[in-house]
């Protein structure tokens, strides 16, 4: 790397360190692509951007597409503590967050001790999250937003970094409980896991049919993960970029002044300010890993669909006519850019 002589020593050191971290993330992406075959640009890249920025992600796909294996490989590559919650209808909130147990104390009496649940991890997988009851689903709200849990009047901070990955099957309805809007809104992105193509299936059958697969090499540490997040938060978003993002959010609201006819007809509820915050956070990480210290409209556009598809609620008319957020998004972007 050629250093700019006009930069201060501190700035040069930051530039050098940023380059090292970018190289390690590139190595992590390559290793992830070797362990999870296919869908690099539409799945692996945005997943990595979101997770590194500290954002929660909802993975939606059919069974058997490797969602759980992908989460495990990502945790191994990040050198992070991986924890899994297999969601079922009989899962209780205490099974997720932890509970207080009564045990013998040092002085001979009885005392309560808090036993941590699986939510205490760096990368936590809530597998088939929509199979948990609403009561259990709600136990994750505080963890996702405030990165802490409260049990029996006692508040425990979650480890840093902390990211929750949720998975769900889009076609099964029996025995499932749709996620409430408040929880969907806490997932920065919803990424659809595509079915592999012919060539990818051949590679999967050739390389992953064995039961014993070696763990993925660690490319980052949790400390470096946090360092990446702190540096990416310094990426600049100009006033023009913030105006563009604000216009995009407002364009999703049917009651907003000047709303498009299609939005008034098909949209029931638009995106929240939290959606804009999540988009900006992931866009900053995308820009930083691309070697820039400023966010562009292209960064926002790249995360717009996965950030909005689960937040914008459509009316029955949209479902009946086969209209999705993907069809409405180009018009919203056009309004925001005007």
Image (cartoon, rainbow, N blue to C red):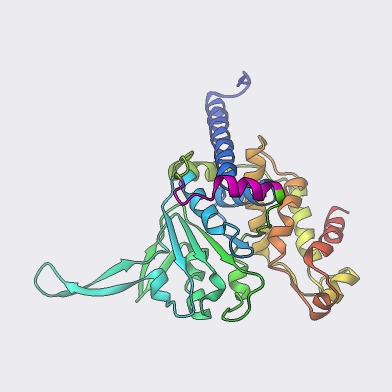
> Quick check: 115 left or right of 124?
left
Residue 283 visible somewhere in the drawing: no
Picture residue at 85% right of the left edge, 53% below the top: 337
Give the image quarter of residue 179.
bottom right
Task: State the image coordinates of residue 63 (x, y, percent, origin top left).
Answer: 59, 65
> Is residue 250 positioned above or below 208 on the image?
below
> What residue span does the magenta drawing correspond to?
199-213
**Residue lying farthest right?**
261
Picture residue at 66% right of the left edge, 72% below the top: 171
> Quick check: 222 left or right of 172?
left
Task: State the image coordinates of residue 104 (x, y, percent, origin top left).
Answer: 15, 72
**Residue lying farthest left?**
108
Q: Quadrant of the N terminus?
A: top right
Task: State the image coordinates of residue 305 (x, y, percent, origin top left).
Answer: 74, 58
| Numbered circles on residues, count | 0
Q: Quadrant of the C terminus?
A: bottom right
Q: Nearer the viewer, residue 292 or 202?
A: 202
> Is residue 188 positioned above or below 261 on the image?
above
Give the image quarter of residue 307.
bottom right
């Amino acid at each position: 790397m050629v250093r700019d002589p006009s930069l201060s020593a501190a700035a040069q050191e930051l530039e050098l360190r940023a380059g090292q971290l970018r190289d390690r993330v590139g190595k992590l992406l390559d290793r992830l692509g070797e362990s999870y075959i296919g869908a690099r640009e539409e799945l692996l890249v945005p997943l990595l951007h979101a997770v590194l920025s500290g954002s929660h992600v909802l993975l939606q796909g059919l069974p058997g597409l490797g969602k759980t294996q992908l989460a495990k490989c990502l945790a191994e590559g990040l050198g992070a503590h991986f924890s899994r919650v297999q969601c079922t209808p009989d899962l209780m909130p205490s099974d997720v967050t932890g509970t207080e147990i009564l045990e013998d104390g040092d002085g001979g009496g009885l005392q309560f001790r808090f036993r941590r649940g699986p939510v205490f991890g760096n990368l936590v997988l809530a597998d088939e999250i929509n199979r948990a009851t609403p009561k259990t689903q709600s136990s994750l709200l505080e963890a996702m937003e405030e990165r802490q849990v409260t049990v029996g009047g006692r508040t425990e901070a979650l480890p840093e970094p902390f990211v929750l990955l949720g998975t769900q099957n889009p076609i099964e309805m029996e025995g499932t409980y749709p996620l409430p809007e408040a929880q969907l809104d806490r997932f920065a992105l919803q990424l659809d896991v595509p079915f592999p193509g012919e060539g990818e299936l051949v590679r999967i059958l050739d390389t992953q049919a064995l039961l014993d697969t070696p763990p993925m090499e660690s490319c980052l540490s949790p400390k470096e993960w946090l360092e990446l997040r702190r540096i990416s938060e310094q990426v600049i978003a100009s006033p023009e970029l913030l105006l563009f993002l604000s216009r995009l959010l407002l364009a999703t609201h049917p009651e907003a002044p000047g709303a498009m006819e299609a939005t008034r007809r098909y949209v029931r509820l638009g995106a929240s300010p939290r959606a804009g915050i999540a988009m900006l956070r992931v866009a900053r990480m995308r820009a930083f890993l691309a070697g820039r210290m400023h966010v562009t409209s292209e960064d926002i556009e790249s995360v717009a669909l996965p950030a909005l598809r689960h937040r914008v609620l459509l009316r029955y008319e949209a479902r009946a006519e086969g209209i999705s957020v993907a069809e409405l998004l180009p018009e919203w972007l056009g309004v925001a850019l005007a």
